[in-house]
Amino acid sequence: MSNTIKSDKIALEQLLNSISPATPGEQSNGVSGAVDNSGGAPVEPEQIIIFDRAGEQKSARKRARNTVKLMAQHALPKPLLEEEYVQNKMEQDAATLADLY
């Protein structure tokens, strides 16, 4: 067992000695490590995620309005639901709930 370890160690040392060390700013694969920021057109960022904010807000408002309407229908009698004050409060609650979505 010690013979294989010694032979592996010798092979590794030979391999390391055969490779020339890279100088600073130079990579071993021949690619320069320096970044050229001197010219060229600026690179535009690539959009990764497509998010329709207006569509999501519209959907949230509709969902909130339906939720508030269903809750009010279960809690209040029909004549009271038609009053302007209650309608105004339902719209306020729907707007608040939509912001929470």
Image (cartoon, grey):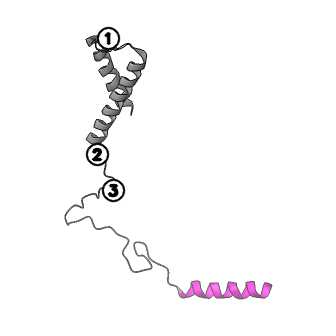
In front: 5, or 17? Answer: 5
Asked if residue 26 is positioned above or below residue 82 in the image, the reply reads below
Q: Secondary structure at mark 2?
A: loop
Residue type beneath disc 1: Pro
Q: Which residue is pictured at 45% across the width and 79% down the height? A: 28
Instruction: Pinpoint residue 34: horizontal percent, then vertical percent.
Output: 34, 69
Q: Secondary structure at mark 3?
A: loop
State whether the magenta stretch is mostly helix, strand or loop: helix
Q: CA distance from mark 3 to mark 1?
A: 51 Å
Are circles 3 and 1 on residues that touch, CB within 8 Å? no
Q: Quadrant of residue 40?
A: bottom left
Q: Is residue 4 magenta?
A: yes
Foreground of the two, 22 or 11:
11
Image coords of residue 93 (percent x, y)? 35, 21
- The image shows residue 85, relative to residue 37, as above or below, that is above
User: Would you name the residue on which mark 2 appears?
Assistant: 52
- Quick one: label 3, few (<14), some, or many (20+) residues within 10 Å? few
Query: Which is nearer the N-term, disc 1 or disc 2?
Result: 2
Amino acid at the residue labelled 2: Asp
Report how far apart the C-alphas of labels 1 and 2 lie in the structure.
Answer: 39 Å
Q: Examine the structure image and report whether residue 12 is included in the region drawn in magenta.
A: yes
Decide which of 29, 96 is in the foreground and name it.
Answer: 96
Neighbour tally class for label 1: few under 14, some 14-19, many 20 plus, Cα within 10 Å: few
Highlighted magenta segment, given as a residue range: 1-18
How far apart are the two marked residues, 2 and 3, measured between alpha carbons? 13 Å
Counting from the top left corner in percent of width and height, residue 36 is at 28, 68
Where is mark 1, residue-wise? 79
- Using the image, determine if residue 50 lies above or below residue 75: below
Residue furthest right as drawn: 1
Residue named by callout 3: 48
